[in-house]
Amino acid sequence: MIDKRIGKRIKQCRERLGLTQEEFAEKTGFTANYISTLERGASFPRCENLILLLNALEVSADAIFCDVLDHTTEYKATQLSNELGTLSVDAQNRILQIVELLIRQEKENEK
């Protein structure tokens, strides 16, 4: 069974580039139907096609597999850090205070 979260990530990365399925298909040499099938999670690309897709999406494999692999916390932390940097300093401070509180609570729960 193909994990639908992978298709969702492919779609998010394509949309981040501002491309329609048709434009992305043209960029990659695939059909729009094939792109749609991938994004719905109905199929998964072969290795060489996956590499072509990742390069066309301008992302690492972590960007696509971060929801399905257990060891991608570094990628997620980097993405959150990048998002945090787009916010105002006040918003950044509020969010960091919440994160620090959650970390303290987790450490206390581990004792």
Image (cartoon, grey):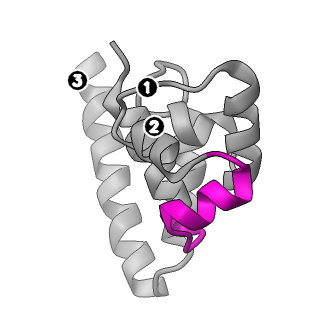
Q: CA distance from mark 1 to mark 2?
A: 5 Å
Q: Is residue 61 magenta?
A: no
Q: Tell me the residue that label 1 is attached to.
A: 43
Quarter of the image with the N terminus is top left
Which is more N-terminal, label 2 or label 1?
A: 2
The one of 78 and 15 positioned closer to us in this rendering: 15
Q: Tell me the residue that label 3 is attached to.
A: 109
Amino acid bearing label 3 = Asn
User: Which label lies toward us, 2 or 3?
Assistant: 2
Name the residue rendered at 71%, 51% in the picture. 28
Above or below, 80 relative to 105: below
User: Which label lies toward us, 1 or 3?
Assistant: 1
User: Which region of the structure is painted magenta?
Assistant: 15-30
Q: For the residue carrying disc 3, how many other residues have a C-alpha within 10 Å: few (<14), some (14-19), or many (20+)?
A: few
The residue sitting at the top extreme is 1
> Is label 1 in contact with label 2 (beta carbons under 8 Å)?
yes
Point out residue 67 in the picture as x, y percentages from the top left corner.
41, 32
Above or below, 92 relative to 72: below
**Is the magenta region chiefly helix, strand or loop?**
helix
Quarter of the image with the C terminus is top left
Judge from the rendering whether residue 110 lies leftward or rightward of residue 35; answer left or right.
Answer: left
Name the residue rendered at 35%, 66% in the picture. 95
Q: Tell me the residue that label 2 is attached to.
A: 38
Q: For the residue carrying disc 1, how many other residues have a C-alpha within 10 Å: few (<14), some (14-19), or many (20+)?
A: some
Give the total of numbered labels.
Answer: 3
Q: Secondary structure at mark 1?
A: loop
Point out residue 13 in the picture as x, y percentages from the top left corner.
54, 56
Point out residue 36 in the picture as x, y percentages from the top left corner.
42, 46
Instruction: Please tell me in which quadrant of the rendered image residue 3 appears.
Output: top left
